[in-house]
């Protein structure tokens, strides 16, 4: 009888294993996908694409025991050969190939030239051929950075005593309300796709004190802009026993500091591929909503129509102002008007026209919305009533407050927007594996 005793030991080696063992002159076995072939006559360079990067292998006529014509771009192969130190190679070494075993062959030619350093093709073409376009080294690096952001979020919050939760995405009632909800039939009952895990996060503060989640959220917004998606990934946390909503901003600042350090340490190769430097996050300025509007209006001689929210151009100009005057890539805008915040947002006791809430702008784009929540049951009910809201469908949410909740607050971060600015893109779809927008439902 066969038994499984753990992770299988492979004979093939990864790039990091070869580097760690200093195997110059040793015979090894490696595998990967043929990224490109450069035929120089008696010698050819076959570059393999592996999970850790590109690996240069050398075919030598008369020494390699196969015909170069047997290998094609996009084949997946296994080579045996000898490690040779070569500073000009991508990893500082190359494999002088002896034998090959072809593992698979493509059925047809590649639709895009993924071996190019930067693909000269449209975003539409890249999205239509997403599983192929992401094989390009630079395209893939964006999502390595995105992995690093998510990893940083998780690791940092675990270290701060948070518990990871997983909340349902189908519900009877939305935390955000409004018309931008995807509605569906759920076994002959009306239901919606959740716009936010807000209700569940708050309920779980009464259980674990500090909770977080990384999960999709859905917004049926009929926007066709470079900054909007109809499904995106939200990095959410909620924390109890706070003394001020500034503790939430401080926690986010700590996350950003931790994550930028993580990216610089463990994703340096991907940052180098993309030619980007991480932004400075040692300190982040904060400014009140009304003050930010006034500063921008005066400096740039602009008048804006919306007194209760920031228009996209205002966000951009606030980012520009703080970059020019304070060399800040991030800025917290605080005390948004109560009229534009959800009913559970806590009003400022000094001026209830405003809330104890904030947005975080990154290079002039809102990537985070957060703030302190109402934790008193009677206050919550009164504010909902004042807004003429129906509480049907919110009974379970309200019950948590009926039985006592600590002072708390939290936030939601748009992962794709944060990634977009970090990797230097202008369209959020460039930082989304498989975007969902007004026109795109596949792949």
Image (spheres, rainbow, N blue to C red):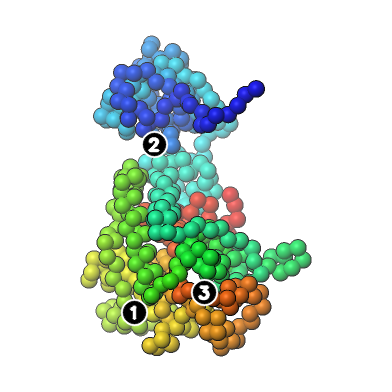
Residue that badge 1 annotates: 288
- When asked about the image quadrant of residue 359, the answer is bottom left
Residue 335 visible here? yes
* Numbered badge on residue 177: none
Upstream in the sequence, badge 1 or badge 3? 1
Residue 189 location (% of width, % of height)? 74, 68
Find out whether the residues at labels 2 and 1 contact each other: C-beta distance under 8 Å: no
Question: Mark 1 or 3, which is nearer the eye?
Answer: 3
Point out residue 419 in the picture as x, y percentages from the top left corner. 41, 56
Identify the residue at image location x=50%, y=20%: 101
Q: CA distance from mark 2 to mark 3?
A: 49 Å
Q: Which residue is mark 3?
A: 405
State which mark lies toward you, 2 or 1.
Answer: 1
Relative to residue 365, is residue 16 depicted above or below?
A: above
**Which residue sits at x=58%, y=73%?**
400
Q: Earlier in the sequence, mark 2 or mark 1?
A: 2
Q: Can the viewer see residue 223? A: no
| Secondary structure at numbered mark 1 | strand
Q: Is residue 198 left or right of residue 282?
A: right
Q: Residue at x 32, y 26 (%)?
A: 21
Q: Which residue is mark 2?
A: 53
Task: Find out whether the residues at labels 1 and 3 contact each other: C-beta distance under 8 Å.
Answer: no
């Amino acid at each position: 009888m066969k038994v499984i005793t753990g992770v299988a030991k492979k004979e093939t080696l990864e790039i990091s294993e070869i580097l760690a063992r200093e195997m110059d002159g040793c015979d090894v076995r490696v595998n990967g996908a043929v990224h490109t072939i450069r035929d120089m006559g008696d010698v050819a360079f076959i570059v393999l694409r592996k999970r850790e990067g590109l690996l240069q292998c050398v075919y030598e006529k008369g020494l390699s025991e196969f015909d170069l014509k047997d290998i094609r771009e996009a084949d997946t192969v296994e080579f045996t050969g000898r490690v040779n130190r070569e500073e000009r190679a991508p990893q500082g070494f190359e494999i002088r190939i002896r034998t090959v075993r072809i593992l698979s062959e493509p059925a047809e030619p590649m639709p895009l030239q993924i071996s190019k350093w930067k693909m000269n093709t449209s975003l539409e073409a890249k999205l239509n051929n997403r599983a192929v376009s992401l094989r390009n080294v630079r395209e893939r690096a964006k999502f390595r950075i995105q992995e690093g952001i998510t990893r940083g979020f998780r690791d940092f919050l675990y270290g701060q005593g948070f518990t990871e939760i997983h909340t349902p995405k189908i519900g009877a009632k939305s935390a955000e309300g409004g018309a931008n909800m995807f509605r569906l039939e759920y076994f002959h009952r009306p239901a919606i796709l959740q716009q936010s895990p807000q209700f569940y996060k708050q309920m779980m503060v009464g259980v674990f004190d500090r909770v977080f989640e990384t999960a999709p959220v859905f917004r049926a917004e009929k926007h066709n802009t470079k900054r909007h998606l109809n499904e995106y990934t939200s990095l959410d946390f909620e924390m109890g026993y706070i003394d001020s909503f500034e503790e939430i901003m401080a926690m986010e600042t700590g996350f950003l500091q931790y994550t930028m350090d993580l990216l610089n340490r463990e994703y340096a190769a991907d940052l180098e591929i993309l030619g980007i430097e991480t932004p400075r996050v040692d300190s982040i300025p904060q400014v009140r909503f009304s003050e930010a509007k006034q500063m921008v209006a005066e400096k740039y001689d602009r008048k804006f129509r919306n007194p209760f929210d920031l228009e996209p151009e205002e966000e951009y100009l606030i980012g520009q102002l703080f970059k020019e005057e304070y060399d800040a890539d991030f800025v917290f805008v605080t005390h948004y008007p109560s009229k534009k915040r959800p009913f559970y947002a806590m009003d400022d006791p000094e001026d209830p026209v405003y809330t104890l809430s904030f947005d975080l702008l990154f290079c002039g784009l809102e990537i985070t919305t957060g703030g302190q929540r109402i934790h008193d049951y009677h206050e919550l009910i009164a504010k909902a009533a004042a807004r003429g809201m129906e509480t049907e469908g919110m009974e379970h949410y309200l019950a948590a407050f009926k039985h006592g909740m600590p002072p708390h607050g939290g936030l939601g971060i748009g992962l794709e927007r944060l990634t977009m600015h970090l990797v230097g893109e202008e369209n959020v779809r460039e930082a989304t594996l498989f975007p969902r927008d007004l026109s795109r439902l596949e792949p």
